Image: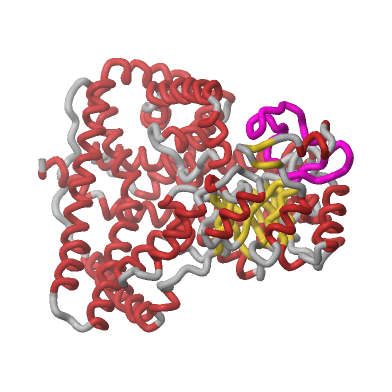
């Protein structure tokens, strides 16, 4: 076993050099690309492209050019992020003397074979489908690609949607598994995309059982190695630190140091994970083609003095980081969370949705605010409802705009009446900030003007925030009524999102990255995260420095927030690290 692992261990330095070089090349390309994209967006009069105005991509020459450049970028990423790794793996496996520079060059130019319809489909699968399915490898640019939570919740709530999605997932997964060795055929055997696909299907059909076994073994060995490393450099030292009768200050310093070292080590593990996996795949590729077990050659031991120099530098960096974090401990690892809890659809699951009872429940659990949805009735009044109709909540399939206020008032949501906008304002006065979403088919400029008028009539400008998924509405309100508080909800954004014309930016969970939150705060704006329902997600964002989380589980979020003030130093540091 150790003999088989040795070649992988010896390849780490080559992988590290490869990762540094390719990441620099990709970073330069992304920097240039970002500047070009921003210039194109600015030429349309926009500072960012978001989920609220994606139509520009298909209705303007700038948008079409952005799409084309984006597609070219995916090709370049596949070339640098995967194809070059395959060439490098071949070099390590066969000992053919290919240099790192030659590997990068060969991997890059292999992308020419994908410049056709079939090849474009392969690239799009790798970039967009593989990250969702977790089948095979994907490029680092889109490895965090996800389906927004609000979409998955809708799918999960409708059996037919769920069955349809499962069928699609199974089909795509089968396609991915059958074509796992397509890239190897193109890059290593110089086959066309079609020929490589045919070869891959044949190899996987004959060897899928062994491939599954080898993958499970690879994952198991990797997990054991990571566990051993974690035990030696993190768990055991931390255990000793917290058992020894040390002074509190010393315990804190050592805790920070070992957690910093552990973070660095696991960052390196992430850096090596994909290249090592591709090495394993390449080894199996040659084994399946020849029918003979192929092992990496064990090279002669080489001395690399600069490796120890790098280790010393990393240790020094950990010491400096520890000193800085210890000096500013309370600022770096806050004991209490200042993040506001906002009840989704009034009170989330704590009471019937979008009702006054929901507002009361949110307030009783210590919520900072409540989010509601307003729609206009046929006779011009504003009532609270999320869906396009009242079918789900009240058993009436009519739309709000098809009903009079009197008709709406006859409905009941789990026994509670459907409130008007005015009634929710009165119920939240002095207790909750009311995040009012302009919703449905009647979310237009008239609704914007009417909502502002009603809020001013109640004198609650400082207790309400008008929000929407439609950026043009928020831009209109912020421009015409700068005294009002506004928020734009988005789940996809590119460009200078922080510069959008609003006071709050509502980000879907996966897009609320530390860099995005930091950029928004630097513009003097606030960040909301929607919809954080799971315990892990709530804890993460309560410690992540956002301004508010919109959640259905208000009580759970309040309990987690209260528990944060009782954390020990170790937990405070862990929460902060995991929040990055």
Q: Position of residue 571 (x, y in %)?
A: 32, 66
Q: Is residue 208 left or right of residue 540?
A: left
Q: Is residue 258 above or below residue 358?
A: below
Instruction: Give 511 or 206, whichever is nearer the viewer.
Output: 511
Q: Is residue 262 left or right of residue 61?
A: left
Instruction: Give 516 or 272, whichever is nearer the viewer.
Output: 516
**Which quadrant of the view contains residue 28?**
bottom right
Question: Which residue is painted at 42% across and 46% down in the image?
Answer: 104
Q: Quadrant of the C terminus?
A: bottom left
Q: Quadrant of the N terminus?
A: top left
Q: Which residues are magenta?
A: 374-400
**Residue 390 on the magenta segment:** yes
Q: Position of residue 485 (x, y in %)?
A: 74, 63
Q: Is residue 492 above or below residue 368?
A: above
Q: Is residue 418 left or right of residue 217?
A: right
How has the structure been colored for display? secondary structure
**Residue 395 on the magenta segment:** yes
Question: Which residue is painted at 29% across and 52% down in the image?
Answer: 14
Say how many tags the image has: 0
**Which quadrant of the view contains residue 205?**
top left
Q: Position of residue 66 (x, y in %)?
A: 68, 44
Instruction: Give 234 or 271, whichever is nearer the viewer.
Output: 234
Q: Is residue 569 left or right of residue 138?
A: left
Q: Position of residue 263 (x, y in %)?
A: 32, 62
- Residue 62 visible somewhere in the drawing: no
Q: Is residue 154 above or below residue 330?
A: above
- Residue 218 visible somewhere in the drawing: yes
Question: Which residue is painted at 39% across and 21% down in the image?
Answer: 178
């Amino acid at each position: 076993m150790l003999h088989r692992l040795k070649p992988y261990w010896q390849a780490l330095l080559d992988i590290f050099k490869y990762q540094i070089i390719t990441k620099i090349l990709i970073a330069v390309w992304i920097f240039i690309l970002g500047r070009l994209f921003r210039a194109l967006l600015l030429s349309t009069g926009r500072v960012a492209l978001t989920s609220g105005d994606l139509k520009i991509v298909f209705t303007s020459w700038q948008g079409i050019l952005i799409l084309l450049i984006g597609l070219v970028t995916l090709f370049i990423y596949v070339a640098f992020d995967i194809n070059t790794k395959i060439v490098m793996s071949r070099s390590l496996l066969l000992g053919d003397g290919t240099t790192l520079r030659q590997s990068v060059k060969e991997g890059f130019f292999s992308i020419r074979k994908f410049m056709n319809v079939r090849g474009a489909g392969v690239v799009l699968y790798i970039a967009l489908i593989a990250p969702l399915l977790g089948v095979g490898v994907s490029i680092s640019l889109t490895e965090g690609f996800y389906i927004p939570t609000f979409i998955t919740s809708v799918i999960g709530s409708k059996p037919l949607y769920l069955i349809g999605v499962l069928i699609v997932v199974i089909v795509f997964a089968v396609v991915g598994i059958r074509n796992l060795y397509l890239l190897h055929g193109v890059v290593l055997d110089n086959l066309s995309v079609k020929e490589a696909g045919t070869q891959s299907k044949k190899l996987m059909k004959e060897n899928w059982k062994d491939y599954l076994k080898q993958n499970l073994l690879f994952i198991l060995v990797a997990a054991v190695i990571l566990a051993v490393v974690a035990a030696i450099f993190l768990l055991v030292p931390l255990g000793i630190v917290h058992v020894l009768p040390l002074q509190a200050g010393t315990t804190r310093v050592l805790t920070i140091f070992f957690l910093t070292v552990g973070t660095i080590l696991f960052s390196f593990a992430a850096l090596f994970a994909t290249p090592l996996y591709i090495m394993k795949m390449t080894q199996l590729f040659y084994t399946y083609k020849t029918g003979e077990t192929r092992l990496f050659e064990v090279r002669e031991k080489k001395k690399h003095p600069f490796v120890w120099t790098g280790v010393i530098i990393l240790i020094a960096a950990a010491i400096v980081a520890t000193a800085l974090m210890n000096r500013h401990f309370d600022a770096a690892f806050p004991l209490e969370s200042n993040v506001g809890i906002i009840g989704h659809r009034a009170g989330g699951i704590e009471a019937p949705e979008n009702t006054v009872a929901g507002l009361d429940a949110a307030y009783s659990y210590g919520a900072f605010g409540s989010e509601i949805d307003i729609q206009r009735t046929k006779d011009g009044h504003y009532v609270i409802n999320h869906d396009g109709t009242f079918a789900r909540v009240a058993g009436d399939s009519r739309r709000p705009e098809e009903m009079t206020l009197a008709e709406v008032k006859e409905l009941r949501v789990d026994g509670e009446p459907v409130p008007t906008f005015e009634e929710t304002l009165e119920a939240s006065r002095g207790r909750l900030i009311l995040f009012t979403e302009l919703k449905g088919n009647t979310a237009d400029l008239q609704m914007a003007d009417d909502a502002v008028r009603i809020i001013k009539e109640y004198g609650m400008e400082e207790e309400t925030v008008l929000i929407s998924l439609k950026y043009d509405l928020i831009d209109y309100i912020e421009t015409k009524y700068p005294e009002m508080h506004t928020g734009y909800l988005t789940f996809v954004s590119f460009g200078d999102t922080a510069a959008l014309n609003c006071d709050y930016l509502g980000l879907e969970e996966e897009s609320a990255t530390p860099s995005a939150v930091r950029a928004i705060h630097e513009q003097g704006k606030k960040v909301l995260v929607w919809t954080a329902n799971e315990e892990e997600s709530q804890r993460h964002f309560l410690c992540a420095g956002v301004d508010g989380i919109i959640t259905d589980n208000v009580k759970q979020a309040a309990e987690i927030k209260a528990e944060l003030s009782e954390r020990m130093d170790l937990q405070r540091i862990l929460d902060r690290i995991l929040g990055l």
